[in-house]
Image (cartoon, rainbow, N blue to C red):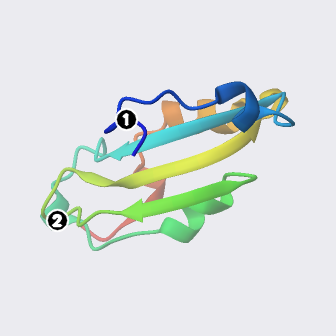
Amino acid sequence: LYYYSQQQPDWPGLLHGKEGKLFSLIVLDNSTGKAGSAIQSFDYDKLLAGFEKPLELRKIDYKKYPVFGFLFVESREENFSELQTILDSDLNEFVTGF
């Protein structure tokens, strides 16, 4: 509601004690090169296992929309590699059936 009411959050207060943490929203685009209708399933459990602290996963009907979902994660700065891995991925490792 902050955005709607044009209020600014107390970022220093909200992030106090979270130094060295990265908070990310990952858009899981269907970058597999395969049509959603051709994909039998997406292994969300395998996806989540690649992150030390997934906060929220919002699954999307990938047969209807060209996205598998939205993933919110908390990562330590020194573990940026988990973010780099998903950013470099075409997500084929999570897809089954064609």
Residue plotted at (57% across, 37% down): 24
- Pick the quarter of the image with the C terminus: bottom left
In front here: 12 or 22? 12
Location of residue 18 in the rendering, given as x and y in whole percent from the top left corner = 81, 36
Total labels drawn: 2
Q: How packed is label 2: few (under 14 Cα within 10 Å), some, or many (20 or more)?
A: some
Residue plotted at (72% across, 54% down): 53
Instruction: For marks 2 and 1, give the one nearer the viewer.
Output: 1
Q: Amino acid at mark 1?
A: Tyr
In front here: 82 or 39? 82
- Occupied quadrant, residue 74: top right
Location of residue 22 in the rendering, given as x and y in whole percent from the top left corner = 69, 32
From what the image shows, is residue 63 above or below residue 11?
A: below
The disc at residue 13 is none
- Residue that mark 1 sits on: 3
Location of residue 13 in the rendering, given as x and y in whole percent from the top left corner = 74, 33
From what the image shows, is residue 40 above or below residue 69?
A: below
Residue plotted at (27% across, 74% down): 40
Q: If you read the primary sequence from the N terminus, does the residue marked by circle 2 or circle 1 appear first?
A: 1
- Residue that mark 2 sits on: 63
- Occupied quadrant, residue 54: bottom right
From what the image shows, is residue 92 above or below residue 60?
A: above
Q: Amino acid at mark 2?
A: Lys
Q: How packed is label 1: few (under 14 Cα within 10 Å), some, or many (20 or more)?
A: few
| Distance between mark 2 and mark 1 Cα atoms | 31 Å
Q: Is residue 6 left or right of residue 74?
A: left
Q: Is residue 41 left or right of residue 38?
A: right
Q: Secondary structure at mark 1?
A: loop
From what the image shows, is residue 70 above or below residue 4?
A: below
